Image: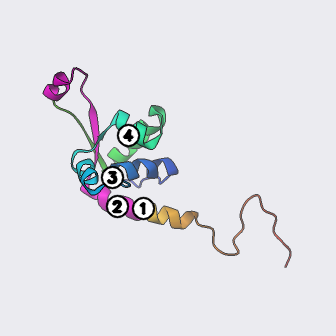
Amino acid sequence: MMNVRMTTHTQTVLHALLGRGREPAQRSAVLSDGLYGLELSRISGLPNGTLFPILERLRQAGWVDRYWEQDATAEAEGRPRRRFYKITNRGAELAPLAMAEASADSTPQPGSFRPGLARRAL
């Protein structure tokens, strides 16, 4: 399995697929059923051109599965079928660790050089 590049946008998508920031019942529904593309776009605030390549990379890494909803459900609601994206067991296990590591890596260490700031002479 490939490593997942943990960008801010990737983390946003993973937060949504993990049901973070939702009530426990809603979180459970997200984990069991997943979210469809337009719903993910609304939650994440990401345009399709950003969202779907991220979802495809996560799918190729084995962190996300995708599936089409049943025809009968869509027909009953008078709309086209939706494609759902659901975090896999592997993704649910590895994503929180990868996001925590990415957050730790982006936290400046005391005394570290930060671009844009002049170094003071000691």
Residue with the mark numbered 4: 40
CB atoms at circles 2 and 1 under 8 Å apart? yes
Query: In the displayed image of the protein, which residue is found farthest to the top?
Result: 78
Q: Given this view, does label 1 or label 3 mark the residue nearer the observer?
A: 3
Q: Which mark is residue 19?
A: 3
Q: Residue at x 37, y 49 (%)?
A: 16
Q: Secondary structure at mark 1?
A: helix
Disc 4 marks which amino acid? Leu
Give, as a single range, the part of the protein colored magenta: 71-98
Relative side of 30 to 96, left or right: left
Q: Quadrant of the C terminus?
A: bottom right
Image location of residue 35, percent across then percent down = 30, 41
Q: Which mark is residue 94?
A: 2
Q: CA distance from mark 3 to mark 4?
A: 11 Å
Disc 1 packing (10 Å; few <14; some 14–19; many ≥20):
some
Q: CA distance from mark 2 to mark 3?
A: 15 Å
Q: Given this view, does label 4 or label 1 mark the residue nearer the observer?
A: 4
Dot 1 or dot 3, earlier in sequence: 3
Residue with the mark numbered 1: 98
CB atoms at circles 3 and 4 under 8 Å apart? no
Dot 3 or dot 4, earlier in sequence: 3
Disc 3 marks which amino acid? Gly
Q: Quadrant of residue 39?
A: top left
